[in-house]
Amino acid sequence: MSSNGGDDESSSTSPSIPGRASAPVGGLTFTEPPQTKTSYYKVAPDNAITFGWNLTSLYSTPDSLTFDAVHTDSDNTYTMGSVGGGESTFEWDPYKYHTENNSPPLVYETYQLRVYDKNGPSAAPAPGTFMPNTNIRFALYKPQSYTPLDEWVCPNCSSAVRSLPLASVAWVVTLSLVLFSGYSVLRGVGGGAGGRR
């Protein structure tokens, strides 16, 4: 009887072993924002960023997913938060993060989104288990304050005229005089020749 039990156990478990070994690595596929280009987000009140995804090729749902923003130049890591493994969206408010004086402070540049489960951001890929995802890049920018049109001053417009070298102005004036004088001489010669006929 025990041998029959053993046969039942082997028949129920053995088919899953080769299947698991040949299964693809699990993870997620983002549905928002697009993975093909960098998305730009304004850091302002009531302007949270939403990330959406679908889980793929997993044998079991992770207990939770953690989200980090990694600054692409300095590698500074900003912990954005966590959600339950069964969730399909995550919302992050960079303005709130910035005003709460977290360290290191946010910079208005490009970040790489890093998503991982309890095995950590450096977990090795394995069939059917969650592999950390770094496919999304996004950038943060700070909006400029509004300036009424009648108060707006072009910082480069007047300076462009002031920065024009005096020699360049003199050259343009001289060239204009030469062309005008030459035209006058030619016109006078043409007029004289017509008079002699």
Image (cartoon, helix red, strand yellow):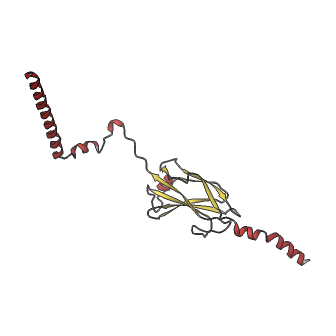
Q: Residue reaching furthest right? A: 1
Which quadrant would the C terminus be assigned to in this image? Answer: top left
Q: Residue furthest front?
A: 197
On-image quarter of the N terminus: bottom right
* 145 horizontally vs 159: left or right: right
Q: Which residue is nearer to you in this view: 2 or 153?
A: 2
Q: Residue at x 74, y 70 (%)?
A: 18
Name the residue rendered at 62%, 56% in the picture: 29
Q: Position of residue 4 (x, y in %)?
A: 89, 75
Task: Give the quarter of the image for residue 154.
Answer: top left
Residue placed most toward the observer, 70 or 106: 70
Vertical order, 85 against 125 (above or below):
above
Which residue appears farthest toward the left when viewing the image?
196
Q: Residue shown at 16%/46% (left/top)? A: 167
In the image: residue 137, left or right of residue 169: right
Q: Nearer the viewer, residue 12 or 159?
A: 12
Residue 33, relative to residue 61: is it above or below? above
| In the image, residue 81 above or below residue 146 | below
Query: Closer to the camera, 98 or 192?
Result: 192
Q: Quadrant of residue 171?
A: top left
When asked about the image quadrant of residue 68, the answer is bottom right
Image coordinates for residue 179, horizontal then vertical, percent: 15, 36
Q: How many marks?
A: 0
Q: Residue 37: give x, y in percent of width and height.
A: 51, 52
